[in-house]
Image: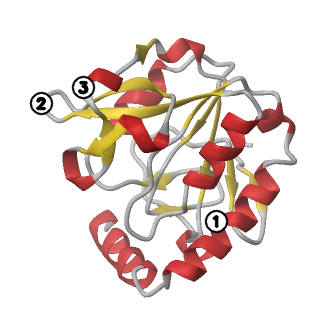
Amino acid sequence: MKKEIRKNILQRKNTFSNEIVREKSLAMLDTLSKIDFYKNANNVMLYISFGKEVTMKPIIDDLQNRGKRVFIPVTVPATKALIVSELKSYEDDLVVGHFGIMEPKEEALRPVEPSILDLVIVPGVAFDKNGYRIGYGGGYYDRFLPRLPEKTTIISLAFEMQLIDKIPTSQYDLPVQYIITEEQFIKCKKDND
């Protein structure tokens, strides 16, 4: 079921032009930049986008212009773990890493404990309004999210077309608290709320 949903959404998303991706991404940044948990966060982790994902570069630029610290995940395929590393320069710190995704060069790896993070922006392929997500299938974030302190705000940015009615979940799935699309800001409801 998850595989079919993932395949379907990725195929549809791949029809977006780069211009549409950028336009919709900037609309999300516009919404995000007005929200208190974003404005008040000092240590923000996000991912380096690839393919037709929501573009993160304008958000990285915005955060750094506001004097915030930016962190990115580094994947460890052997253990399926994520290391949190500080990103100081998008242009100078990154090289193509695992899965063809940009990651820090060895000399630019600046690991920190996840406990310092105020805000984490989590990638995904599909989402429901309860905050559950289907990722790319590696389980990296399923292992990482439980390591975050309760104070950390966890959100996702997604195109409207990535929203579906219900994500099939297991006991290990942790929902995000908010989803921002190009059209709406969703405060995710828990199934039992």
Q: Which is more N-terminal, label 1 or label 3?
A: 1
**Local crowd at mark 1 within 10 Å, few (<14), some, or many (≥20)?**
many
Please identify, in this view, whether the residue under mark 1 or under mark 2 is nearer the observer.
1
Kindly identify the amino acid type of the residue bearing the numbered disc 3.
Glu
Label 3 environment density (alpha carbons within 10 Å; few <14, some 14–19, many ≥20):
few
Q: Is residue 133 left or right of residue 95?
A: right
* Separation (CA) of disc 1 from disc 2: 32 Å
Quadrant where the C terminus sits is top right
Is residue 124 toward the left or the right of residue 19 in the image?
Answer: left
Query: Circle 1 sits on which residue?
Result: 25
Which disc is residue 78 wearing?
2
Q: Are marks 2 and 3 in contact (CB under 8 Å)?
A: no
Q: How are the residues colored?
A: secondary structure
Question: Going from the N terminus, do you reach mark 1 or mark 2 first?
Answer: 1
**Residue 40, can we see it?**
yes
The residue indicated by pointer 3 is 106
Q: Nearer the viewer, residue 70 or 54?
A: 70
Label 1 element class: helix
Residue at left offset 71%, top offset 61%: 28
Locate residue 40 relative to residue 92 in the image: left or right. Answer: right
* Badge 2: residue crowd in 10 Å (few <14, some 14–19, many ≥20): few
Figure check: 114 above or below 129: above
Which residue: 56% across, 42% down?
175
Q: Residue most toward the front?
A: 92
Is residue 172 something one can see in this rendering? no
Q: CA distance from mark 3 to mark 1?
A: 29 Å
Give the image location of residue 39, x and y in percent: 82, 35
